[in-house]
Image (cartoon, grey):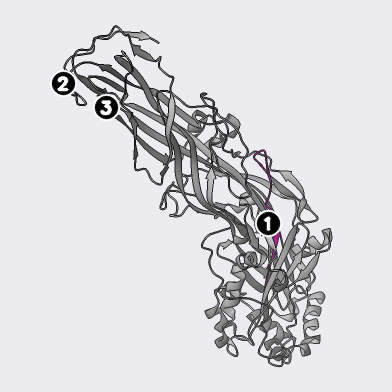
Amino acid sequence: MKLSEKWIISIVTIAGFCSVLFAASPGWSQKKAVVQPAIQPGAMPDNDGVLQKQLNLAPPLKTSGMRQLGNRQIMLSSGKKMKLKDVATLAFQNQNEFAASVGKKQLVGKAILAMPVVREEVSEFDDLYVLKQSTQVIVTNPSELKAISPQFASLMASRAGNPLNMSALDKSERESIADIIANIDQRDPNDPLRLAAAKGEQALLDAIQAGLGEITVEDTFIVPRTPIKVVDGVVQLPSLEGGTLNFKTMAPVNMALVQPVATTGTKSGKASAIAAGGKSPGNALAATSGPEHAVSKLSKETIANSATCDTVVNEQTGQHEFSLELLNGFTLGNAWMWERRWDFSVGFFRITYGAGYGIGLRIPIEVKGKLSPVEVNVCDANDSNLNVETRLEVNTLDADAEYYRRAGLSNNKVFNGHELVLEFQVGYGYKLHLFGKDVAKKSYDALKGLHFSQNTRPPFGAYCPECGVDIAIPPEITETEIDFQYLKGALVAGIHLNGKGTVSIEKTDSIGGKTSGKHTITFSNKDPLGDVMTVPKTTLRGNATHSTVWYGLKLDRFQYHIDLHMIPELKFSFTAGYKGFNRSFNSPWIRLSAFAIDLPNYTLGSHEGTVNRYVFENGRKQFTKIENTTTAKPGDRVRPIAAKRVQK
């Protein structure tokens, strides 16, 4: 399948994150010192909000601003540490973009009453942090602001054809308008709702419908302090308790993912199976072993001492070609909760989304090789060195299920040959509160387990337009669609992955039953790489006139090195309409970069139970000493060797 240029996460946390458009801090202040917006973030009670649910489980150890807690560190899934303030920068990127779009000085007095107020709060718990940030602005000219701020324009995209009249409101709804008027003196004298209220209830309602007055956008994130554990290749995800993620009670994902393996040493003189692998900080990979993949060794032969060779011969013939089907892999996971709330004069809309996920990445690697020559006969007065050339070619594949089986993977881990194995557990909730009542509501309830996998060619080299996968999970799968009388829309979850990869192989020369010349060959594209092994000339001792030297190679430590970034992302589109009062809540793809998996320079070893070693030792050089004044050149053959071959 044709996919994006960079192998799209993440994953991960990510190299090259976008910089924040503007620095939000509690130090911001409005130009008019007496401005006191009627709605402070969280002023309207919402017992289903993320932070409130967390507080119901346990009180925080500390609640403060980012200045006080920003240098606290969390441990990422890659094993790296990251300061909380840097996590917040990533988490609130979309929030900051909104603040930047409405926070332009030239808009003050034309579209907004004063510069926006940005508030932030950090609640520290023993197993997680809750980060909250809000941006509040008082709109005086909606038309002007829509032209400047795409987010505000989106909010106001759905408008009723006819204005909502006070006569259409019931008693409790009219009381909510009366409450605004009762507290109207707390507002700035130039607040547009205060000016409208002076003309009566209907004028105030008209102003609210037009988009005048305060708008607050608030984001809340739950950030775990330590990485999600993987036990026996299975991601352990937090349970749901009281409507929030409980990281103290972990449970496995229903289906096991791929299991990483680690490097172990070979036993001298044995062709036992040894798994290749690697380590990443904080991610020690479990040792395992798999089948050796090697050609059956031919019976070694030698030339009998009675052989005669009285003519110069230097014949180099034959080549050995081979193809290996390898599979490398790993499993990692993460979990988070995210919430966005829009507050306006007569209510709020809140959407909550939480997820835990396990990602298993399998890397099918095809290795093709050629070794030549494999049969050398020399009859001469003196022997000479022999150069044996090896040519290797490597490529990553979008492989099928049969490839996985041939590589040695057990059937219960084939997963239809998917390179990317994803497991999700998601939760979802929302509330639309208007004119003092909840008109649409879904509590954040039990998580739903999902299995969502993809075929893709893993990244290979710095540029690979056909590599990677960009996954958008349909809302009907995550059950994040809404079709309610007053609220319609959907939230779409996704995964953004990017990265680049290389393959390395450790090659060891084998000459006369001894190993030498061990070195690593690294591939970043399909171009073949050559390698030359020198079989030294034979020096006969005493009265000996003949020698046979066997040579070949061993390939192992098949390792896949990746710069992987996996970023969870989401987008949503909702339309709320109640008695003629309408708002739209939309977003582009929001990358939850703070919950990325970042694996720079991560080494993936052979997948458990699969090919991890290749041995060929059947190259043969025979030297027979004769008295002759002319030294033979490779290819010279005046007379066939009159030799008798016997089984050794």
User: Looking at the picture, does residue 140 appear above or below residue 417?
Assistant: below
| Residue bearing the label numbered 3 | 384
Q: Position of residue 539 (x, y in %)?
A: 32, 22
Residue type of the residue flagged with mark 1: Trp
Numbered tag placed on residue 336 in the rendering: 1
Give the main secondary structure, helix, strand or loop, of the magenta stretch. Answer: strand
User: Looking at the picture, does residue 618 appear above or below residue 506?
Assistant: above
Q: Position of residue 360 (x, y in %)?
A: 58, 43
Residue type of the residue flagged with mark 3: Ser
Counting other residues with Cα less than 10 Å from the Cα at mark 2, is it few (<14), some (14-19), or many (20 or more)? few
Distance Cα–Cα, label 3 vs label 1: 67 Å
Question: In the image, what residue occupies the spot 74% across and 79% down?
Answer: 39
Give whichever of 483, 162 is nearer the camera: 483
User: Looking at the picture, does residue 3 appear above or below residue 219?
Assistant: above
Q: In this view, which residue lies farthest toward the front?
A: 542
Of mark 2 and mark 3, the one earlier in the sequence is 3
* Number of disc labels: 3
Q: Classify residue 546 as left or right of residue 106.
A: left
| Residue bearing the label numbered 2 | 629
Distance Cα–Cα, label 2 vs label 3: 15 Å
Give whichever of 340, 14 is nearer the camera: 14
Of mark 1 and mark 2, the one earlier in the sequence is 1
Secondary structure state at the residue bearing disc 1:
strand
